[in-house]
Image (spheres, helix red, strand yellow):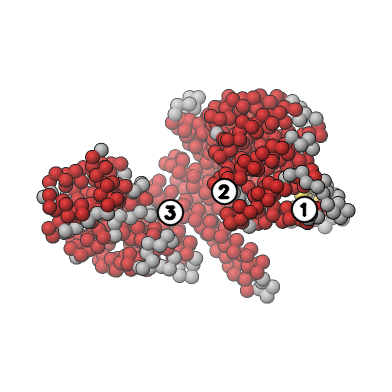
């Protein structure tokens, strides 16, 4: 028999590897690992206890912990075949009587339910009575963590199985939680944090059915969110170093010549509460409206809460949710008599606060989140945003781009340093990825501003052009080039005639980028060519030949339809179609139109697919000579495309699909039988069957 120390180490290693190597480890080795972990939860004899004082209970709890680690990176499909064995073993451990084992089993069961989702319904009736019994009976002070873990497990099981299955038990569980919430809990009781999270999960599970409980949930949640940090300040060079204290609940940061010690438990409770408020606003939408006037003044100041990143992140995430809740409540008439002016007032409070916080934010990742939140708020508020706010956002974008460039230069210098190593290289790689996310969000915000204000935004675009034009350079990252192209695409598409003045500057860049080595850059560039072909009129006309040449390279590339290239291919085909549609007099249409038809259908980019297939339908409806070809020779190809499109998923709008069916029925009735038969014979048997089914229905 293997010594217990070895088994302990093996379980520990599997747990750690499951976290470090997931999800690859789970995908490749589930059939070996999961049965082994299930057997490790059995009560087996202990050997080698002279080396390590282990007990069966410790082994069982340790194995349950490894199951937790493994299941966290599992898909429901991987877990499903093993659930019988795992859940039955965890149920046995739940009844073990030893608190350490029960806590481990509860945490593992929660993770398994969360990862297996609807597959867990089969076990619900067996599991829930045990969970409720622990929740009700674990009342001693020594059992507080056990009760807290049962809350976590119940709420995750409820989310996994869904509202219909969980509804009746949910009522009983919430009665218990309400009675606990009404009782006086000690400040160090872990139940508080677990209960806040359990309420939020119950809300996610029950949706609007949770609204009656909000009057119970919100007061203590707001109280936790409004907690003041417990701070101790000393001199940075003081002998009385907080770091040297034995109090693990204190965290220290140095600001200038001051050392600040902060009680972490308070900050963690505050962060949890802020996250929960965001969760409720997100889940309840307009149902959250009655609480906005209390929550907004609580969270907006926390955008600059520099003691704790999680608090700032939660506050940032909540901003668009609060605005969305207010807007929906007004639109649906459940805003207690408030109208759009209330949404404007809230927007005027939130957006400037976000922009100001962004200006002072030291963390790049949170900068990206703030930019994302600003973008969402702009999309919700739309024209309610006034020119002064647009000015402040544009000025902040300039500052963001400048600061980002400075950070990139600093990283380049670090990479040249003598002590540069692999670890530092990995750190720089992570920082570069965060930087790209910042640029991505800048592009998103500018796209939203352009779509919202159209030509009225162009004076701001002119100001920004000196910041954006360098992003087209070959020395920039592919992501920067893509974002710069997308911004011009938005200007050309949304501003139309007003954007023609920019074509001379940007179209040469666009044409060159059509053959960029990066497929995302190519996609943005060829999409832009399609936009310019549609709206550029006589300004685009001299460039039609060059555009055709560039698109031809993309479309004819031998790997054009590989997964990484298919989006660029589809957008190039769409752009070619727009040249056929808007510049036919400038092309050899007898060659180009059939070449375009030969590329159809497109199936990767579902947005462009709908545009292209509608264009095809329109051309058939008007009996386009170049499309049909001499003696209707391209008709079989057209019918074949119709068949593929109608049998595919989301390749066409419902309206276009019905028009295609109408056209096919018309062809059936009007074409000579011999032509119809030869057209049909060129289709695959599956296409023939599918079309017959569609036409006969």
From where the camera sits, is residue 543 visible?
no
x 35%, y 58%: residue: 570
Location of residue 208 in the rendering, given as x and y in whole percent from the top left corner: 53, 29
Horizontal arrangement in the rendering, residue 53 relative to residue 589 (left or right):
right
**Lateral position of residue 638 relative to residue 276, left or right:** left
Q: Percent from the top left, x then y, of residue 568?
A: 38, 60
Which is nearer the N-term, disc 2 or disc 1? 1
* Spatial CA span between label 2 and label 1: 25 Å
Specify few, some or many for label 3: CA neighbours under 10 Å numbering under 14, 14-19, or 20 or more.
Answer: some
Q: Secondary structure at mark 2?
A: helix
Label 2–label 1 contact, CB within 8 A: no
Residue linked to disc 2: 78
Image coordinates of residue 485 in percent, x first then y, are: 41, 60
Instruction: State which quarter of the image contains the N terminus.
Output: bottom right
State which tag comes first along the sequence, 1 or 3.
1
Q: Is residue 634 left or right of residue 258?
A: left
Q: Which residue corresponds to mark 1?
A: 8
Q: Which mark's residue is nearer the viewer, 2 or 3? A: 2
């Amino acid at each position: 028999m293997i010594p217990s120390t070895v088994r302990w180490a093996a379980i520990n290693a599997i747990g750690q590897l499951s976290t470090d190597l997931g999800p690859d480890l789970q995908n490749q080795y589930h059939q070996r690992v999961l049965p082994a972990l299930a057997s490790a939860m059995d009560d087996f004899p202990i050997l080698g206890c002279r080396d390590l004082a282990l007990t069966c209970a410790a082994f069982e709890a340790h194995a349950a912990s490894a199951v937790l680690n493994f299941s966290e990176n599992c898909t429901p499909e991987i877990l499903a075949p093993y659930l019988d064995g795992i859940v039955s073993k965890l149920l046995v451990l739940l009844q073990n009587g030893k608190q350490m084992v029960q806590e481990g089993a509860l945490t593992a069961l929660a993770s398994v339910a969360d990862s297996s989702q609807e597959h867990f319904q089969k076990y619900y009736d067996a599991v829930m009575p045990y969970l409720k019994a622990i929740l009700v009976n674990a009342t001693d002070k020594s059992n507080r963590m056990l009760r807290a873990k049962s809350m976590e497990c119940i709420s995750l099981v409820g989310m996994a199985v869904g509202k219909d299955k969980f509804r009746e038990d949910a009522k009983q569980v919430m009665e218990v939680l309400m009675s606990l919430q009404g009782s006086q809990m000690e400040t160090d009781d872990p139940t508080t944090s677990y209960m806040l999270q359990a309420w939020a999960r119950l809300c996610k599970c029950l949706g609007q059915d949770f609204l009656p409980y909000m009057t119970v949930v919100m007061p203590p949640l707001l109280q936790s969110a409004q907690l003041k940090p417990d701070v101790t300040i000393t001199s940075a060079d003081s002998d009385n170093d907080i770091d040297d204290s034995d109090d693990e609940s204190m965290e220290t940061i140095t600001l200038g010549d001051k050392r600040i010690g902060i009680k972490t438990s308070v900050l963690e409770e505050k962060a949890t509460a802020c996250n929960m408020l965001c969760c409720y606003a997100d889940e309840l939408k307009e149902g959250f409206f009655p609480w906005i006037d209390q929550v907004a003044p609580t969270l907006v100041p926390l955008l600059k809460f520099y003691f704790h990143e999680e608090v700032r992140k939660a506050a940032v995430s909540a901003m668009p949710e609060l605005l969305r809740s207010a807007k929906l409540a007004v639109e649906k008439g459940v805003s207690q008599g408030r109208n759009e002016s209330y949404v404007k007032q809230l927007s005027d409070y939130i957006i400037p606060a976000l922009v100001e916080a962004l200006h002072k934010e030291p963390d790049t990742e949170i900068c990206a989140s703030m930019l994302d939140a600003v973008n969402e708020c702009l999309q919700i508020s739309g024209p309610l945003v006034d020119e002064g706010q647009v000015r402040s956002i544009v000025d902040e974008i300039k500052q963001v781009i400048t600061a980002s460039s400075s950070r990139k230069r600093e990283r380049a210098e670090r990479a040249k340093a003598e002590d540069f190593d692999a670890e530092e290289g990995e750190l720089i790689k992570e920082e570069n990825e965060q930087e790209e996310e910042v640029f991505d969000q800048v592009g998103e915000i500018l796209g939203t501003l352009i779509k919202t204000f159209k030509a009225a935004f162009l004076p701001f675009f002119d100001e920004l052009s000196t910041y954006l034009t360098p992003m087209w350079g070959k020395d920039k990252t592919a992501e920067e080039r893509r974002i710069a192209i997308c911004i011009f695409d938005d200007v050309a598409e949304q501003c139309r005639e007003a954007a023609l003045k920019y074509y001379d500057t940007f179209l040469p860049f666009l044409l060159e980028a059509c053959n960029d080595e990066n497929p995302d850059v190519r996609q943005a560039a060829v999409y832009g060519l399609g936009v310019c072909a549609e709206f550029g009129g006589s300004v685009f006309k001299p460039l039609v030949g060059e555009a055709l040449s560039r698109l031809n390279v993309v479309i004819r590339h031998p790997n054009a339809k590989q997964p990484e290239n298919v989006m660029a291919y589809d957008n190039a085909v769409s752009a070619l179609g727009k040249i056929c549609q808007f510049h036919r007099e400038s092309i050899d249409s007898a060659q180009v139109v059939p070449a375009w038809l030969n590329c159809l259908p497109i199936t990767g980019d579902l947005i462009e697919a709908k545009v292209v297939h509608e264009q095809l339908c329109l051309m058939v409806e008007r009996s386009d000579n170049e499309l049909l070809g001499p003696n209707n020779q391209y008709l079989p190809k057209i019918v074949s495309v119709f068949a593929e499109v109608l049998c595919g998923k989301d390749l066409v709008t419902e309206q276009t699909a019905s028009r295609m069916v109408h056209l096919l029925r018309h062809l059936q009735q009007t074409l000579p039988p011999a032509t119809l038969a030869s057209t049909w014979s060129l289709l695959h048997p599956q296409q023939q069957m599918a079309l017959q089914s569609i036409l006969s229905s």
